[in-house]
Amino acid sequence: MEVILLERIESLGQMGEVVKVKSGFARNFLLPQNKALRATDANRKVFDERRVQLEAENLTRKAEAEKVAAKLDGLAVVLVRAASESGQLYGSVTANDVAQAISVAGVSVARAQVRLDKALKQLGLEPIRVQLHPEVSVTVTVNIARSVEEAETQSKLGRALDRETMEDEYDRAAAADEAGSRAPEPEAEAETAAVEDEKADA
């Protein structure tokens, strides 16, 4: 089926272009969503009459999308999930999960705006594109970890924690705890110094 695009659509074309698409895609998505018209002579005339209005509406939506993009720029959201030692998730992270995490961070986005080709099934940092408008998109980092602490470490490293890195982090934390337990309390140090002074005076 040939249709006239009423807005720019990724992988199809620009506003006003006549493109050929599958009938099901046109009937189930493009036409009911008012993203296109059937390419008839009558509809070509309708489009030409509405073109200025459509372009003005598009500019307004684009400006609003750019404001949202500015808020999302550089955003990283954390999703805590259970996973195996190899980093394989027990389950998966979907576009809906990402959209909800972004909304919790203070910016409302729809699941359909999250461009996730397939569900995420591994721990780590994933750059995810959010399409706010046909001409405006922004990348959000999704940090999938077993805990908030692990997410912070992944963020510092810029990658998922492997087993060796996790063991190193554990060893460092254990060493720090041990060093802390060995360190004398300030009051104990003062008492020891006082006793030594008394012995010296005697």
Image (cartoon, helix red, strand yellow):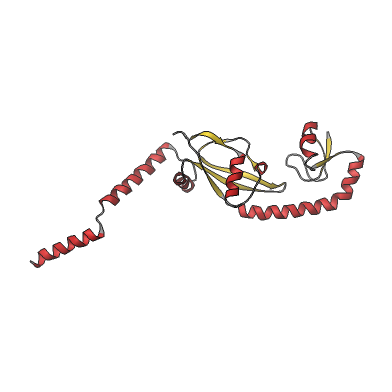
Of residue 16 and residue 190, the one placed in the foreground of this image is: 190
- Residue at 64% of width from left, 45% of height from top? 130
x and y percentages locating residue 199 in the rendered image: 10, 63
- Location of the C terminus (image quadrant): bottom left
x and y percentages locating residue 54 in the rendered image: 82, 50
- Residue at 37% of width from left, 42% of height from top? 170
Identify whether 1 is placed above or below 149: above
x and y percentages locating residue 163 in the rendered image: 42, 37
- Location of the N terminus (image quadrant): top right
Q: Is residue 109 left or right of residue 197?
A: right
Q: How many marks?
A: 0
x and y percentages locating residue 171 in the rendered image: 34, 43
Identify whether 81 is placed above or below 53: above
Q: Is residue 81 left or right of residue 94?
A: left
Of residue 153 and residue 147, the one placed in the foreground of this image is: 147
Q: Is residue 186 left or right of residue 90?
A: left
- Residue at 33% of width from left, 45% of height from top? 174
- Residue at 69% of width from left, 52% of height from top? 65
